[in-house]
C-alpha cells in the first residue's frame, strides 16, 4: 500500500487481456512492458493457472524494478495446471467454454475494484469471444484490439465472414478435404497473392457450421469491426501491401513489431534472455549450443499447442538423424497427443550422437545463437517473427490457426522457408534439412532472412515505422484516457 500512496491517479492505466496461451501472453507482456517504459500504468490479467505457471517458471522476475505494473488473475475452472495427459487443444477448449460463460462478470468485478481507475483496455483480438468488448462498453472504457499475429494471419481470420457469404465454407462434406477443392486459389483477398483455400485457418474448413472453432472464428471476424483501434504484431516493410489494405478498412492501425527488438531499444539493454514463459526454460540447451560451430545446428520446436502422433515424431526423428546435421529439439511433455513422448530405443540411441533434446528453452536466445543455422517450426507467428529478427531461415510444418497462412507467406512471399508435407516422411525431412543447411536453396533463404533481419532492425530504430507507431499508440492511449 505504500507504493499505492504514491500513485498518480490521473496517469493513464491500461488493462491487458491476453488470450490464455503461451505465445499470446508472451507477446502481450512485451507490449505491456514497452508501454510501461513509456510512463503508463499497467494491469495484466492472467488466468489463475497461467499466472501460477508464469511465476513458477521465472517469467515475472524482470518485474522486480517495475513499480506501476501489476498482475491480476481470474479463475479458469481448472484448479491446477493441466499439462500431462491432456491434449493442449482440448484443455484450451474447456478453458474457452468457461471464460465465455464467466469472464464478463469476473472482469467487471476485477476492474471496478482496481485502486487506480482503468482508462484503456488492450484486448487480444482472439479474446473477444469472452464478451470483452461488451464489458468495455459497460465500463465506458475505450478498447484497442491487439492481434498478436501477422497481418496475413489477421486477414485470413477476417475473411471467415466473406467465405461464408460466398458459400465457400463450411465445406459440404469430408470428401472436399481430399478431392482437390482446398487447392482452389483465392485471388480476391486484399493484399494476399497465390493463397489457396488450404492456406487459410483450418477452423474455416469445417464441414459443419456449428463446429466450435468455426463459430469462434466467425464471431471473432465480426467483432473486429466493432473496434476503431487495432494493433498488429508485424512491421510495415514485411507486409506493406497487406498493412495498406487493412488501413483502408480500419481507421487506426499500429504495426509494432518485432516487439523484442523494440524492447531492447526502449530498455536500453539486451532482453533476449528475459523469460515470459509458462514453462521452465532449460539453460542446458544454450550450453550445448556453445560447443557447436557457427550455422551448424537445426533448431526444432513445434510450439506450445501443436500435437503430433508418435509416428510423426519418429519420422521427424529419423529424418533429423539421417540428415547428419546437429539438432536441438524441444519436445514438450504433452507433444504426443497430450501425453509424454516415449521415444523408441533405437531412435533415442541414434539421436544421442548429433542431437540434444530439451523440454523448453529460451527461444530468442537460441535463435540468436551463432551455432543455429536453421529452424524447423510449426509456423506460429511468434516463432516466425523471432526467426526473421535473428536472420534464420526455416522449414515449416503448420498445424492450427494462422500457421498455414504464415507458412505460405514465409515460403512464397518472404522466401525464407520451405514447407514439409502434412504426412511426415523421414526421407522428405532429411532432404529438406540438407537443403536448408548445406544446399544452394538454403543459402539463398539464409541471405533473404538476413535481409529481413536488417529490415526489422531498421523498423525498430528511433525513426523506424514500428518505433513511430509505438509512440503514436502511447500518445493515443493518453488521449483516449483524457476523454
Image (cartoon, rainbow, N blue to C red):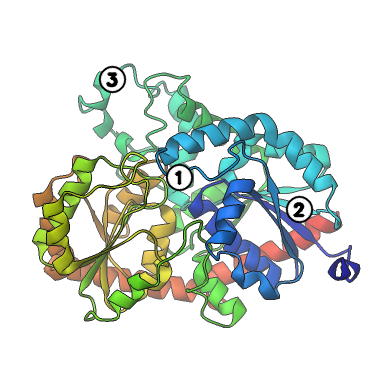
Which disc is residue 325 wearing? none
Q: Residue at x 37, y 38 (%)?
A: 200
Residue beneath the point at 52% across and 58% down: 233
Mark sitting earlier along the chain (1/2) = 1
Left or right: residue 40 versus residue 127 is right
Q: Splitting the image into 4 quarters, where does residue 474 fall?
A: bottom right
Residue at x 21% of width, y 50% of height: 343
- Tell me the residue that label 1 is attached to: 83
* Mark 1 or mark 3: whose residue is earlier in sequence: 1
Within-10-Å neighbours for mark 3: few <14, some 14–19, many 20+: few
The location of residue 201, given as percent across then percent down, is: 39, 38
Say left or right for 420 vs 469. Answer: left
Above-or-below relation of 414 to 284:
above
Q: Earlier in the sequence, mark 2 or mark 3?
A: 2
Side of 479 relative to 227 (left or right): right
Give the residue at mark 3: 174
* Residue drawn at the location 79% of the way across and 55% of the way down: 480
Where in the figure is residue 462, as x and y percent of width and height?
58, 79
Secondary structure of residue under mark 1: loop
Quarter of the image for the N terminus: give it.
bottom right
Q: Quadrant of the C terminus?
A: bottom right
Q: Are marks 1 and 3 in contact (CB under 8 Å)?
A: no
Residue 222 drawn above or below residue 434: above
Q: Please tell me in which quadrant of the rendered image residue 183 appears.
A: top left
In this rendering, which labeled residue sits more in front, label 1 or label 2? Answer: 1
Spatial CA span between label 1 and label 3:
31 Å
- Please state the horizontal and vertical placement of residue 152, each as a whole percent of the image: 43, 49
How far is the residue under mark 2 from the one under mark 3?
45 Å
| Residue at the spot of label 2 | 120
Q: Is residue 356 visible?
A: yes
Amino acid at each position: 500500500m505504500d507504493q499505492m500512496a504514491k500513485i498518480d491517479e490521473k496517469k493513464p492505466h491500461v488493462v491487458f487481456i491476453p488470450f490464455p496461451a503461451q505465445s499470446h501472453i508472451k507477446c502481450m507482456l512485451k507490449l505491456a512492458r514497452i508501454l510501461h517504459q513509456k510512463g503508463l500504468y499497467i494491469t495484466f490479467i492472467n488466468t489463475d493457472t497461467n499466472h501460477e505457471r508464469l511465476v513458477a517458471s521465472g517469467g515475472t522476475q524482470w518485474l522486480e524494478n517495475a513499480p506501476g505494473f501489476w498482475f491480476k488473475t481470474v479463475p479458469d475452472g481448472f484448479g491446477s495446471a493441466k499439462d500431462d495427459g491432456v491434449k493442449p487443444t482440448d484443455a484450451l477448449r474447456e478453458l474457452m467454454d468457461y471464460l465465455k460463460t464467466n469472464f464478463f462478470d469476473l472482469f467487471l468485478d476485477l476492474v471496478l475494484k482496481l485502486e487506480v481507475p482503468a482508462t484503456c483496455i488492450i484486448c487480444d483480438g482472439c479474446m473477444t469471444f469472452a464478451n470483452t468488448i461488451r464489458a468495455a462498453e459497460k465500463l465506458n472504457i475505450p478498447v484497442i484490439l491487439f492481434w498478436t499475429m501477422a497481418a496475413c494471419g489477421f486477414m485470413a481470420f477476417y475473411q471467415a465472414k466473406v467465405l461464408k457469404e460466398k458459400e465457400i465454407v463450411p465445406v459440404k462434406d469430408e470428401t472436399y478435404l481430399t478431392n482437390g477443392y482446398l487447392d482452389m486459389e483465392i485471388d480476391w483477398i486484399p493484399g494476399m497473392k497465390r493463397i489457396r483455400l488450404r492456406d487459410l485457418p483450418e477452423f474455416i474448413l469445417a464441414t459443419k457450421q456449428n463446429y466450435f472453432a468455426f463459430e469462434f472464428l466467425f464471431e471473432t471476424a465480426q467483432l473486429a469491426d466493432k473496434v476503431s483501434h487495432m494493433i498488429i504484431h508485424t512491421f510495415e516493410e514485411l507486409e506493406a501491401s497487406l498493412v495498406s489494405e487493412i488501413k483502408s478498412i480500419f481507421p487506426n492501425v499500429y504495426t509494432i513489431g518485432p516487439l523484442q527488438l523494440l524492447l531492447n531499444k526502449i530498455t536500453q539493454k539486451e532482453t533476449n534472455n528475459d523469460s515470459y514463459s509458462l514453462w521452465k526454460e532449460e539453460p542446458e540447451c544454450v550450453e550445448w549450443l556453445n560447443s557447436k560451430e557457427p550455422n551448424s545446428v537445426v533448431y526444432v520446436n513445434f510450439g506450445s499447442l501443436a500435437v503430433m502422433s508418435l509416428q510423426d515424431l519418429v519420422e521427424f526423428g529419423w529424418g533429423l538423424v539421417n540428415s547428419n546435421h546437429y539438432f536441438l529439439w524441444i519436445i514438450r511433455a504433452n507433444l504426443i497427443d497430450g501425453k509424454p513422448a516415449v521415444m523408441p530405443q533405437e531412435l533415442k540411441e541414434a539421436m544421442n550422437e548429433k542431437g540434444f533434446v530439451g523440454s523448453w528453452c529460451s527461444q530468442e536466445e537460441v535463435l540468436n545463437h551463432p551455432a543455429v543455422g536453421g529452424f524447423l517450426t510449426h509456423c506460429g507467428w511468434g516463432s516466425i517473427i523471432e526467426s526473421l529478427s535473428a536472420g534464420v531461415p526455416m522449414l515449416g510444418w503448420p498445424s492450427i490457426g494462422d500457421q498455414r497462412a504464415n507458412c505460405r507467406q514465409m515460403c512464397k512471399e518472404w522466401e525464407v522457408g520451405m514447407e514439409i508435407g502434412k504426412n511426415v516422411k523421414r526421407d522428405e525431412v532429411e532432404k529438406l534439412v540438407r537443403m536448408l543447411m548445406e544446399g544452394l536453396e538454403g543459402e539463398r533463404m539464409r541471405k533473404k532472412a538476413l535481409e529481413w533481419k536488417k529490415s526489422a532492425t531498421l523498423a525498430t530504430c528511433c525513426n523506424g515505422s514500428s518505433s513511430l507507431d509505438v509512440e503514436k499508440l502511447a500518445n493515443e492511449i493518453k488521449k483516449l484516457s483524457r476523454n
